Image: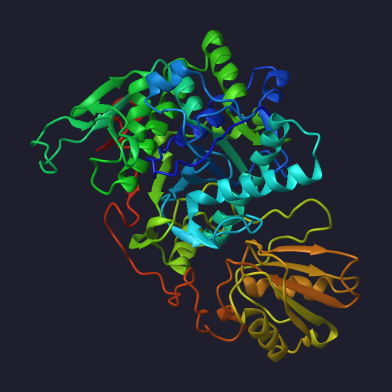
Amino acid sequence: MTALPGVRSAAGKALYGIGCIAASAVLAVSAISYYTQKQVADIATSSVASGGPSTGPMNILIMGLESRTYWDGTLIDHHLQHILNTGSEGGNATNTLILLHIFAGGRKAVAFSIPRDDYVQMVGTGGYGPGMNKVDAAYNAGLQARISADRKAHPSWTTGQVSVDAQQGGQQAAIETVQALTGVHVDKFAALNLVGFYELAAAFGGVYVCVKPWPGGQGIAANGNLRDPVVYYQSTGWQGSGSVVKPGVQHLTPEQALAFVRDRHNLPGGDITRTQRQQAVLDYVLWKLKTAGALSDLGKLATLMSTAKGYLAVPRGWNLIQFAGEMNALTGQNLVFHTLPSAPGPDIPLIGDVNTVDVPQIQAQVQQAFSAPAGGGDARPGAPRSPAAARPAAGGPRTPAAPATGAPHRNPAAFTVDVTNDSGHPGVARGVLNALGAKGYRKGTAQTGASLQSLTTVTFGPGAHPGGTAIARYFGPGTVVTGSGAVPAGHVLVSVGVATLQVPASLGGPAQAPDSPGAPSSATPTPTSGAANGDSISVPKDAPYGIPCVY
């Protein structure tokens, strides 16, 4: 890979979200279906989330990093720091996280923006940092843990080599933390940093946005311009993006576009409304690619490709040319954006103000939206059905995804079940083992795992394939089922992940969720509304430039 990030400001410097352009880069590159395979292969690649098909229904995590460096850790030059109002300090937080589901055929998609301040269980961070933190901190924690490990294991590596490898630790931690929060498997990812946003916006000649008329308040007159001035505070350093926008449709230069998606200080809902700006810019990019000649102009394509090579990272082996065939039919009207529901939470020492989240509610909402109707194919987002099947890590056979409801095996006593608690939720492993014993399976051992894993998996030993597939059904669709000679013959090993908060209802009724800061006890989704509680954004038909109007 080439290389990214620096260090989080100790003064609590404002962090800026820009990850929607990572999705833009994926769309831009994938849409070049007639471009050479070699040029596509030059995109920075990662071993994280590698393998698996390049097309078909999939979940893609889009990460926008606040980094002011290249992938090898080199700082961006002073000129870019000046024109972008970013300064030289910044961290590796994923201030934009968008989980995008592409339905089979590529004609429809649904996405969820994940507010950066959501207070969740960290997974895959190697013990670096607190166990509960803002979701945007997972990348930096995983990266720092990998840096520490690499310096011990590879003392001869250069700083650039360590930085490049450490990005993969950050990518893995961000993916696993999002999987634990949403309960769905991430198949692919795309990562981009601050400079990448600017360069891609420049390649598009800037962007068009539509701003709603301001109703008045927060020191701004009705129908006044929304401003986010750059101001220096001795206690916190530089604050503000420099954004100035007026009501209505307008063109923004690359610098103005970056300021637009970074602004959060004068917006209703703060970070939540900022995600809607990012979503709107992605809608514009999609419109531009499809309708304004960006895909038929080889000069523009070459510029986009060159930019993507410098700032975009994707999984190794993801054939973006094949991916293009399915993405070609996607339009803004068929790309629906949501924001995960959350509520203002406490100010936690050394972490700051956080959002509280109802994990069962989020999992139910995401899994329903990502589901497909009977018979597969395109789906209306939100259709009540099972989520896309998860794909296992490399190695070992895999069974088809388990049906949505549990069904007992005709001879459960033929299999012994062992359960490992890799969830961090006390008592879950013992509860699962007792519940499976009540279903007729022979009870083996229940123990605590050495580290957390995001999703529950089922591994069967020789001769236990039928038992493994039957048991996986109790944990819902998409549960990964693999075979391994390391598991004794006739045994099934259930590794309970963080996303499993309690004993599944299909194993004998809902149990009380463990007492854990990140595991609310209510498993029943509660309808919510408002910008801070899961609003959705869609593009009106015939909207100018294919964009919705946002603040």
Image position, residue 475 (x, y; %): 63, 71
Image position, residue 114 (x, y; %): 44, 50
Q: Is residue 263 above or below residue 499?
A: above
Relative placement, left or right, of 148 versus 222 is right
Relative placement, left or right, of 255 versus 105 is left
Question: Image quarter for residue 443?
Answer: bottom right
Relative placement, left or right, of 186 versus 160 is left
Q: Is residue 241 above or below residue 153?
A: above
Residue that sits furthest to the front in the current view: 234
Instruction: Say which of 544 and 514 sits in front.
Output: 514
Whether residue 187 is visible to the viewer of this picture, yes or no, is: no
Image position, residue 467 (x, y; %): 79, 76
Instruction: Say which of 270 and 222 sits in front.
Output: 270
Q: Residue at x 49, y 61 (%)?
A: 120
Q: Residue at x 24, y 42 (%)?
A: 267
Relative placement, left or right, of 457 versus 377 is right
Q: Is residue 80 above or below residue 155?
A: above
User: The N terminus is located in which quarter?
Assistant: top right
Q: Is residue 278 above or below residue 86?
A: below
Question: Image quarter for residue 106?
Answer: top right
User: The C terminus is located in which quarter?
Assistant: top left
Whether residue 147 is visible to the viewer of this picture, yes or no, is: yes
